[in-house]
Amino acid sequence: MADTLPGTDDIQARALRALGRIGLDRPVGDGLRARTPITGGKLVDVPVTTPDAADRAVAEAHDAFRIWRTTPAPRRGELVRRLGDLLREHREDLADLITAEAGKIHSESLGEVQEMVDICDFAVGQSRQLYGRTIASERPGHRLAETWHPLGVVGVISAFNFPAAVWSWNTAIALVCGDTVVWKPSELTPLVSLAASHLLERAASDVGAPTAVHRLLLGDREVGERLVDDPRVALVSATGSTRMGREVGPRVAARFGRSLLELGGNNASVVGRSADLELALPGIVFAAAGTAGQRCTTLRRLIVHRDVADELLDRLTTAYRTLPIGDPFSDGTLVGPLITRSAADTMDRALARARDDGGTALVGGGRRFADVAPDAAYVEPSIVRMPEQTDVVREETFAPVLHVLTYDDFDEAIALNNAVPHGFSSSVFTRDQQEAERFLAADGSDCGIANVNVGTSGAEIGGAFGGEKETGGGRESGSDAWRGYMRRATNTVNYDDRLTLAQNVSFL
Ligand code: NAD
């Protein structure tokens, strides 16, 4: 691992080469600045989408929907299969752009592209499995069934920390479901979105699909608000902070649109007295410090049985002290930069509040590279032992701060896990089967994701992804999440020669 940082020029050249290989010229325009958190420097200026252009994009996607919804689903799957092929081909290019713009270490960026490939494979299979049920009718000579139809234009609003994968979870599934997509990515990652969007455009032209099945809008929240308020957008799938969801959800509901909200998380792992600490240790470190604490599923609270707390904390603090922090392009780096300096300031404030609440910082909390890259924000992941679950512990701080609480009784651990506004990811490390099952039971973890002997982050695409309470309640990616992108019609067919009314009603 290098203990220096690359220059902004090198990162810019690498990003432009990746864009070039994907088939894009250097973007020309202004209004939005693509920057790299690796140095805090500017990469290029890109054009922002004007309100008129946004309106046109929605209109085009709305028109394309009329064609796309009647294209047979397995043929829609061919578009997604081609997208998957192009993603495989440009895996390194897209990963370079993700590392350059989001600051993720390169192996995690490659992992993000792998998730995109995986969801394309999943969606291609799904294109032949948009099953409805047949239901026993109470009337003679009647058939009751449900059919699933395409919904319309899906507006995808996404966050900076998974700048491409979240788009692909939504888009691959929406496209096979017969929907068209208008994407408003994070204003912090415009180059990744230009690249991903261009690959889809290439895929559409390769298989002869209308290119307007997808449109990209670049800009900040105001551009996103156009999707939120547009009645032609049938579903708004919004990923980001709970603050954002609190604004988006009611506005979409006010026009009776559908929303799928994937919001913040304040995720916990319980470590039981019987836990295999050898196994738990890497799971905890990856979940808490990986992606510099900037995953929605990042581990933020560790709830440890009092008998194993000292040993676990000793081992954790030792592991934290040697975490390689630095250039995310460099082999061996495990912790890259935070997205902005203000994210590091937020972390400092959270640490100060934890101290005021009686917390003891066991490790981390300092800054690195401040002299050579004053516009970047490299922080040392921190572990803070807390006397109780105070307000700062109950909030999501989007940075690598792990709060540690101890417990004596397993019910107490479950209560602590659940006593936060979010309900996203959770896990238990234990060799006690009763504890594991209790954690997964109806009165166990109240989260959308509940794991055993696995950390809170790093979900596979095959499961439905999302969480409860202030995490928004949405589910995307695998399992039957596709249903959220379709409308259901219940069909009653009478093949009798008499009309029978339900519930034995007599009329005429
Ligand atoms: P953010 O809320 O600042 O922005 C997310 C997106 O929403 C951006 O594209 C932004 O422009 C847009 N936006 C913001 N306000 C809007 C509004 N009023 N109307 C329309 N669009 C609006 O989030 P961020 O800082 O980019 O990402 C970090 C947050 O996202 C964390 O809270 C993290 O937990 C969460 N997140 C959740 C998931 C998940 O699957 N649940 C995944 C990734 C990130």
Image (cartoon, rainbow, N blue to C red):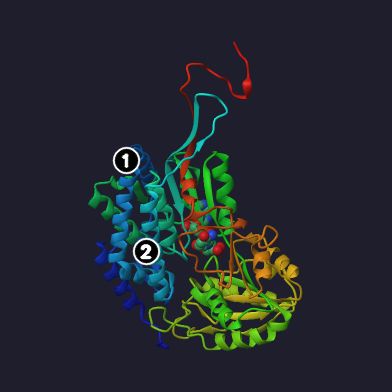
Q: Give the left or right position of residue 312, taking residue 49 as reference.
A: right
Q: Quadrant of residue 443?
A: bottom right
Q: Amino acid at mark 1?
A: Thr
Q: Quadrant of residue 63?
A: top left
Mark 2: few/some/many CA within 10 Å (<14, 14-19, 20+): many
How many numbered marks does the figure carry? 2
The percent position of residue 52, horizontal first and vertical second, equals 38, 44
The residue identified by callout 2 is 192
Q: Give the left or right position of residue 108, taking residue 384 as reference.
A: left
| In-front residue for pair 468/398 | 468
Which image quadrant: the C terminus? top right
The residue identified by callout 1 is 71
Give me the C-alpha separation between circle 1 and circle 2. Answer: 29 Å
Residue name at image x 50 percent, y 24 percent: 141
Q: Compared with residue 251, is residue 201 higher up or lower down, i.e. above or below?
A: below
Q: Quadrant of residue 168?
A: bottom left
Residue name at image x 57 percent, y 42 percent: 253
Q: Compared with residue 458, is residue 377 higher up or lower down, i.e. above or below?
A: below
Which image quadrant: the N terminus? bottom left
Q: Give the left or right position of residue 99, taking residue 302 as reference.
A: left
**Mark 1 vs mark 2: in front:** 1
